[in-house]
Amino acid sequence: MSIEPKFSRRTALGVVGGASATVFMPAIARANTAEISVHYSMPAIFKEAQEAVLAAFTAKNPDVKATYVNPTPTYEDGAQLILRGATTNQLPDVSFQGLNRLRLYAERGIALDLGPLLKEEGDLEKLGYTKPILGLGFHGGVQCGMAFATSNPISYYNVDLFKKAGLDPDKFPTTWDGVIEASKKIKALGDGIEGMFFRWPGDDWMFSALLYGHGGRMLTADEKDVAFNGAEGLAALKLLDRMVKDGGMPNYAGTADLQAFAAGKLGMMFRTTAQVRSISQSVGTNFVLNTTLMPVIDNDKGRLPTGGAGAMITAKDPAKIKAAWKFIKFATSAEGTTLMVKNTGYVPTNNLAIIDPSHLADFYKANPLFQAATRQVPLMIPWYAFPGQNSVRVTQVMVDNLARIAEQKATPEVVLADMTTEVRKLIPRAG
Amino acid sequence: MADAALTDPSARAKQRAPARADTSGTVVAWLLSAPAIIAYVLMLLAPALAMLMLAFTDFEFGARTFRWVGFANFAEMLGDRGAMAAVRNTAVYVLFVTPISIALGLLLAVLIDAGARGRTVFRAIFFLPVVSLTVAMAVAWQYILHPNIGPLNAALRMFGAPTPNWLASSEMVMISLGFIGVWENLGFNMVLFLAGLTAIPRDLYAAAEVDGAPGAWSRFWLVTWPMLGPTTLFVVTITTIRSIRVFDTVAILTQGGPNKASEVLLHTMYVEGFQFFRMGYSAAITMLFLAVVLVLMLIQTRLIERRVHYG
Amino acid sequence: MSTHPTTESADRGLLADLPRLLLLSVFALLILAPYIWMIAVSVKPQSEVFTSSLSLIPKQFAAAENYGKVFAQVPIGLYLLNGLIVCLGILAFQIAFAVPAAYALAKLEFRGRDTLFAFVMLGLLVPVQVPALPLYMAFANVGLLNSYTALIAPFTISVFAIFLFRQFFKAIPDELIHAARLDGMGESSIVWRVIVPNALPAATAFAIFSVVAHWNDLYWPLIAVNKGDYYTPAMGVLAFRSQEAGEDYGALMAASMLVTAPLVVAFLIAQRRFIEGITMTGLKG
């Protein structure tokens, strides 16, 4: 062990605040070292967090030598890495994947069911793993993985534009009706200024925010048929339709909304909290940016989808599984989750870190923009992962249909009917 | 390379007519081609065939097994809005990019060739898009084409012209991608035409002038254009192949949207196989792609053969 | 619209040349537009990338931050070096394999030639994504992933090179080859001692296409390399892309500049040769 890793370990420990320095790798422990390799995606976001977690983990667990394989640029590349690796036994031992894809690996026999390992841990609440938190990685009866860094949709808004439009920036609308009204007023400022954008393209995540918000669900409980085709689904689509019709919502592709927002030309934006850091960097001092909770649709039944990354075990060897589990347990512990939050701004995934202010209170005080998402933690439910071989394709069908509303080419009723027919074709049918 | 023994016996025969199709000539030719053939089979043909076989299976990316499903994937394709849109959009893109980028490439080449000033600079500038990284350039295009804050619409607004939603409207998106495609291919074609122009003997122009073609315009049609025939054929082939493979810009800028309005074949193939993990179906799309390209090449060869004959 | 031969117009007055230069400049500006933005962004802080004004000049100069971030987060020097090794390796094999085959296709008549050429054309059409997965599995099975070999081997065959060289060789006078045969040279020494020296311009032309393609390759390196420092330059740019958290535009553009600059320099150096190379290729259909 050279000087360098020790140094970075010490700085990482400094961040944690107070862990003792005595753990510097006593030579004794090397005898039965288990080596595991760990994979994660999107180094632009996670590199610092992962390295801090690894350094703190290694300091506490000298018997496990964990190393990272080259991180993949996107979740998609990460998924391909795992699926390719599965056909050639080139898998890492631990992999961090998009929460909505964990199910796919479990169904293909790549991700280990963590249920039995959790059972051995005894009282899970004591470890900070509440049922909702575990639920983020629980699909089709299998604990496919453990949520590591989570996100939920929040409201971003331009305080300056609010003031200009005669709106009170301290009273962001709590209902969509209010948002649509505000959007009209902001758009009326002219000069190419748009009122609002609800980030529907890309995947089904933001649509599920509208659906869950109404208390709806994607499929029936037995996963044999669609369930979004009821009143909640229609209401969700009608709401999107009204954003366009009444709120004057523009049609933005890709990241055009982020660019317009940064340029001070967009009043409100509804997007994942994962972007807080980069948006506030883009905004700089150009105007005052604020974030807040999503408007509420249904006070009792309304929920929000959870995005982000979860860790799964892909190792087959028992010794490696044991070491991999140790690593995941640490990464999702109060200490690991604190490191993650401090380096990324994502929502914590360990209840101990959430309820005990000693972990993150200072962080949120210093970074108030991150608070909105954390206050929505009680509303978070899993981002639904469709079963079967078309699990990802289904989401594209939804986005394509939403585009018809955004372009005002079809009514919500027509879109809902088409979406129902098309999705039905893609889910595994009852025998 | 110990080749003397190979060729000596036939050397005499070859002095008259170059390398007839005799047995030893055939052996030599195949020996010369052997390294290329081996690499071709190992690195391209065999893996590509293995992949295409999957078109008849339900293989999923990462799965351990698969079933043979006959032509089920092809049947599905017929009813797949996305696949059909991809065929249509790819055709539109090729028909847009190929002629425009060739015409503009030729125009630029002629303009550059017409004088010595700025030759090196302009040549380098127009070639720049060819050496650039599409990822970075696409990000730049996204900004330029931004509906609110993009410089293009800002300019249009100044003239009071309508400001289209370049990348997010189903009507505009293929045109926008087409223009980016022209931008990408223009310099490539210009360089090829420049090369063709340099090869035209200068006295031909003098002769044309004597024959009563004094204007630049008539000289172009009398000398330049016919003499560029072979170059044009080469350019058309290469540009068609390049534009039919459009993928990067679509993947980065529109992901085939809105609602399949910019779905193109290679993007569909990629998305089905590597994002939706349906390798079997993806392979079937690849087959469709190859079939479309083959038909296109056949038509083109026919058309061009006719042209070059009288040219 | 002036199609004057070069020699004549070289000494044309600047005034007469002005319309031509003006027209070219307009086109040049259109071509350069995205680069101008790219360069501007690479020296801007993130907060000035998207503003309501179209200003290109940063209020706060952030070149040091952006370029510094690239050097700090990615071993870009190493990637450039890898790019050099991989691109030259690929190029060497491509030329070594393609030249003899192209010569046979262009200058020899033999049984199966048309079939062989049809396969070349077919190869031109196959997108890289198609053979990628089986190749990955093969490399994994022989334990060759994460190596220069894995990065180079799949591209040792270039059907485009065969296509291009064949076109070029057709233009080489038969007499040259006859004379060599009369001197008692075998076919393969004709290839390496007569054809290749004559083929240098074409090789330069091909080299540009080949190097550009593999220098900028975003696809195969991601598959062939998952451990160790074998990434090629374009991968250095990917490190700054993130769809989910929003792009770091300054660093992204700075990395793109660093990756593209060597290619531009190489093109400027090779430019003359390059045009000559294609010139001869274009001579004959």
Image: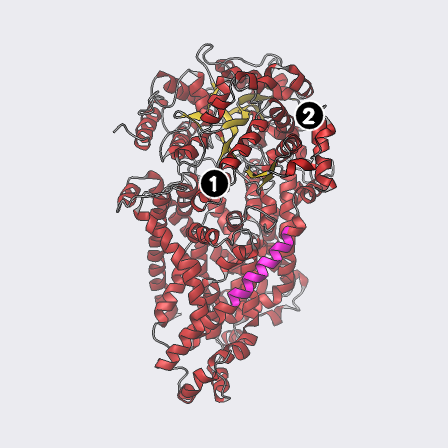
**Disc number for residue A16:** 2
Look at the image and tell me whether residue A48 can be seen: yes
Look at the image and tell me whether residue C34 can be seen: no
Q: What residue type is labelled 1?
A: Ile
Q: Residue sitting at 58 percent across and 45 percent down? A: B136
- Same chain under badges 1 and 2? The reply is yes
Q: What residue type is labelled 2?
A: Val
Q: Residue sitting at 50 percent across and 53 percent down? A: C143
Q: How is the image coloured?
A: secondary structure
Q: How crowded is mark 1: few (under 14 residues within 10 Å), some or many (20 or more)?
A: many
Q: Specify whether A398 is left or right of A320.
A: left
**Disc number for residue A82:** 1
Q: Residue sitting at 50 percent across and 62 percent down? A: C156
Query: Does A211 sit above or below residue A60?
Result: above
| Main secondary-structure element of the magenta-colored stretch | helix
Q: Specify whether B88 is left or right of A65.
A: left
Expressed as whole percent of the image width and height from the top left, the position of residue B11 reads 43, 87
Task: Determine whether the residue tagged by mark 1 lies in a helix, strand or loop.
Answer: helix
Query: Does C33 sit above or below residue A234?
Result: below
Task: Determine whether the residue tagged by mark 2 lies in a helix, strand or loop.
Answer: helix
First to last magenta residue range: C79-95
